[in-house]
Image (cartoon, rainbow, N blue to C red):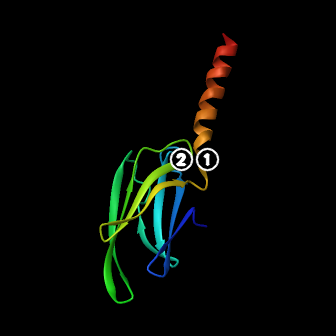
Amino acid sequence: MPNLELEWNGSKFAVTSTLLPRKLWQAASIDVFLDGECLLRTGGVFKLTGSHSAEFEHKGIHHQVTLSWGHASFRSFPIKVEVDGTTLHEGHVVSGNWPLSLWPWLALGGLISHMAWRL
């Protein structure tokens, strides 16, 4: 299910963000789709900021899509989606499974609380 849908050239771009089990659910894959076909997947690289580009064909013409992301906030990432160098969207995409990012911190807090109670 897309977190963000954009209209472009008579087609629908969709952007999703999903947390992955790498680095204790602190890494995410941000993926870009055009009419349901995946054009670009960041694959859960553990980088605070970055960008990925991919080429695709639409209605017989070759294009380039670029996804840039910034520092994640509690539930989302700031992103910029460009097609052929023109900004299609600049905003945020919410990770669909963001509550998973909380469990390592809750476990750590519980452990610290348990240790403090025993003192």
Provide the secondary structure element on which disc 2 rests.
loop
In this figure, which residue is indicated by the disc labeled 2?
A: 25
Dot 1 alpha-carbon crowd within 10 angstroms: few under 14, some 14 to 19, many 20 or more:
some
Identify residue type, mark 1. Answer: Leu
Up the image or down, 33 lies above or below 44; here it is below
Residue 48 picture quarter: top left
The outermost residue toward the top is 119
Residue in front for this viewpoint, 102 or 14: 14
Front-lying residue, 108 or 4: 4
Would you call the spot at circle 2 few (<14 residues within 10 Å), some (14-19), or many (20 or more)? some
Which residue is depicted at the point 61% across and 22% down?
112
Q: Which residue is mark 1?
A: 100
Callouts 1 and 2 close, C-beta under 8 Å: yes
Q: Amino acid at mark 2?
A: Trp
Residue 102 located left or right of residue 62: right
Q: On the picture, is 106 further left or further right than 68?
A: right
